[in-house]
Amino acid sequence: MATIRDVAKLAGVSVATVSRVINKNGYVNQGTEQKVRKAIQQLHFEPNAVARGLASKRTGTIAVILPDITNPFFAEMARAVEDEARKHGFTVILCNSDDQGAKEKTYIEVLKKKYIDGIIFASQTLGKEDVAQMKKHNIPLVVLDRAPSEEDCSIVRSQNSMGAQVAVRHLLETGCRKIAHIYGPQEITTAKERLLGYEHAVKGFDWFTPTLMVPGNFRLDGGMKAVELLLEQHPDVDGIFAGNDLMAVGALKALHRLGIRVPDQIAVCGFDGIYLTEIMEPELTTVAQPIYEMGSLAAEILIQKINGTLQENQVCELEVSLIARNSTRRERMK
Amino acid sequence: MATIRDVAKLAGVSVATVSRVINKNGYVNQGTEQKVRKAIQQLHFEPNAVARGLASKRTGTIAVILPDITNPFFAEMARAVEDEARKHGFTVILCNSDDQGAKEKTYIEVLKKKYIDGIIFASQTLGKEDVAQMKKHNIPLVVLDRAPSEEDCSIVRSQNSMGAQVAVRHLLETGCRKIAHIYGPQEITTAKERLLGYEHAVKGFDWFTPTLMVPGNFRLDGGMKAVELLLEQHPDVDGIFAGNDLMAVGALKALHRLGIRVPDQIAVCGFDGIYLTEIMEPELTTVAQPIYEMGSLAAEILIQKINGTLQENQVCELEVSLIARNSTRRERMK
């Protein structure tokens, strides 16, 4: 295999010049550059990525830190990140954090040492000091699902509070008169914003009482348990808005086991728009986020930051949209 | 930040000596090593992974090439790979191939240049020449779901043909008298083996005819379309064995739309054991592979190969197990 020295010799220039051409840094005059490129071609020289990483401190690798790839929401997002990254010649390191701060911090340490070019952070416990540290080390960062201007980084998110209000309004329109909410872990921004959106939409109604808000854990089993708890206290509930689709699927399952008909007795609406909602019976109504778009936009912004074509931090809030399906398709009741 | 030169200066040794200590290669006497380690500590020197990769040709990174992370089967497997890799201090690069040979080849090229330490290949179109090339470049390789001794590499797989026979026997035992099979793409080893297993189990029966085998594509929509095709030709089918769970879920959905009761009119059994089977209504019977175990075993073997603690190629065939649920729970009929 040809080395950088062979290229330098054939082109009649120094190794440093060849390195400048390969890494596109520093001045090389056009004639020299052409000679170097010709030599590279003739010798079938392949500059290796590790050596280039060392020289340019770039490796063509980004990382995505997310809670759990087996959650379909994050699988779709990761797929989008990887598709977009590949288009630009980047590879993607996958990190499952289980939303544990300690795991996330360990990843950041490891990734820093590997000269990762940038990080997409779809996990929740990123602290201000982490952001500051990455800034210090010049590692571009895009976070998903955070409050705008909370930290000094780019953000891709969707309309959580507004989406929750859309869900409640839809349930009211289909005739529901006592609507409960299963909320996700309150340390997670999106869960909190959706809960606030629900509260805002229902607080004016006579039937509203705080015990209509029951905790879930953003997972299937959380949705199932929440339904049991809810129906003990409020057997007359006729609508459920779940803070994410996995909990809505769990709720549907629990209702089925209890012999409660959906949507006739209780209508159910989720949030996210994962494909699971479509395969359920009845199909689930959901407030859909543009999941794939969010992942691909996050990757695009990150790569622009890495390439230096984008200077300012971006905060993008994408629109959500209600997808009405059979789980809320009921006759309007008085 | 301290550099390797600072460490060398403080320890009173050459940069090459420090490098030997960091990369644990070449002889360094004990006293010198202690001096170097002390200097590293004093200066808070962090040897960077890229430089070490260049020296040792190792980067602590493995790659997993799989068809599509949004398929729950591969999401669970990737999760297992990453969990196991992290335990050993490795990070994981995720590559979605969509089972396209061209994408896979591009990945192999990119990964080679990045000094990836090893590759887990869960995609299908890996050719003999790819395996040979990786061997030439000394990149350890573990493949999932291949025929044993087909190629010169380690293999982790499960009992596909046997599992198919278990599925057919179970359907017969629950009273089915005309069992169809929806098969996956025949260029995929697992799909082929399951089809052969089905054929082997049913070919002795009077009712068997080749048109009972209908193609799917290992996806939901394939399962749905296959049911329509099947019922046109064989309205009297009373059992369906789908070559994977996603197609079984699709079949269930299509049967529901056609107003056909599962399991009373048609019993359905899938293959894989993904969690989706549990959330369906009725819950799906399936031949479960130990998905997480397969992923974690593949990572373990790969890392042993990388670390040099395992020399020989391993071929591991893991057991499958029938999980009988409501989609086949019917009264025994004559």
Image (cartoon, coloured by chain):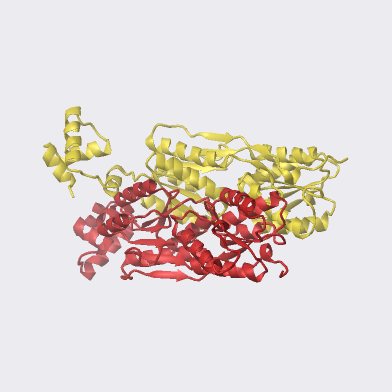
Chain colours: A yellow, B red
How far across and down, in percent of the image, does residue A73 sit?
A: 57, 48
Residue in front for this viewpoint, B176 or A79: B176
Residue in the foreground of this view, choosing between B309 and A255: A255
What count of labels does the image hold?
0
Q: Quadrant of residue B209?
A: bottom right
Furthest residue toward top:
A30
> x, y (%) of residue B266?
68, 60
Query: Is A120 located above or below residue B34 in the figure?
Result: above
Left or right: B262, with B115 as reference point: right
The C terminus of chain A: image quadrant: top right
Q: Residue at x 36, y 52 (%)?
A: A113
Residue B43 visible at all: no
Residue drawn where x is 20% and y is 57% of the image = B16
Q: Quadrant of residue A256?
A: bottom right
Residue reaching furthest to the front: B206
Q: Position of residue A29 (x, y in %)?
A: 19, 29
In the figure, residue B124 lies in which quadrant?
A: bottom left
Q: Is residue B197 above or below residue A306?
A: below
| Residue at image location 39% in from the left, 50% down from the top | A112
Could you say which is closer to the camera, residue A278 or residue A168?
A: A278
Q: Is residue A231 visible?
A: yes
Q: Nearer the viewer, residue A15 or A44?
A: A44
Asked if residue A235 lies left or right of residue B121, the reply is right
Q: Position of residue B312 (x, y in %)?
A: 32, 71
